[in-house]
Amino acid sequence: MKKMKSKNGWTCLLLVLAGVVLGGFIGSLFPSSILNFGQTFGLTSPMVLDFGILTITFALTIKITIASILGIILALVIYRLL
């Protein structure tokens, strides 16, 4: 009998995050190539909550590039092979 092994969701999440980081790094190495082509979206100016003694700043910007998409695809292929 073959033993079934279950795949961990945390492993998939970590591999996808590593793929995004590596893809972003590769895209930044070649700034004028097609790998760095993409779209940026999010809050362009941060939202600030000032309570007098406490100031909280919220900001989020996401840049999706072709290199990061390739990194995600590569991470998912590696996860499927595990």
Image (spheres, rainbow, N blue to C red):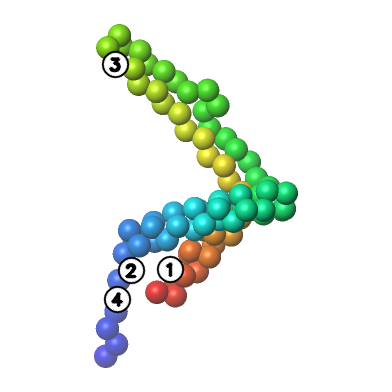
Residue extending farthest to the top is 52
Circle 2 — which element?
loop
| Dots 4, 1 in contact, CB < 8 A | no
- Looking at the image, residue 35 lies above or below residue 1: above
Disc 1 residue type (three-letter): Tyr
Disc 4 residue type (three-letter): Lys
Residue carrying label 1: 79
**Relative horizontal placement of residue 63, taking residue 4 as reference (left or right):** right
Disc 3 residue type (three-letter): Leu
Q: Earlier in the sequence, mark 2 or mark 3?
A: 2
Q: Looking at the rendered structure, which numbered label has been put on residue 7?
A: 2
Sort mark 4 into few (<14), some (14-19) or many (20+) by Cα contacts within 10 Å.
Answer: few
Q: For the N terminus, which image quadrant?
A: bottom left
Q: Earlier in the sequence, mark 1 or mark 3?
A: 3
User: Residues under labels 4 and 1: Cα distance?
Assistant: 13 Å
Q: Which quadrant of the figure has residue 53?
A: top left
User: Residues under labels 2 and 4: Cα distance?
Assistant: 7 Å
Q: Looking at the rendered structure, which numbered label has been put on residue 5?
A: 4
User: Residues under labels 2 and 3: Cα distance?
Assistant: 43 Å
Residue carrying label 3: 54
Q: For the C terminus, which image quadrant?
A: bottom left
Residue at 48% x, 64% y is 76
Q: Earlier in the sequence, mark 4 or mark 3?
A: 4
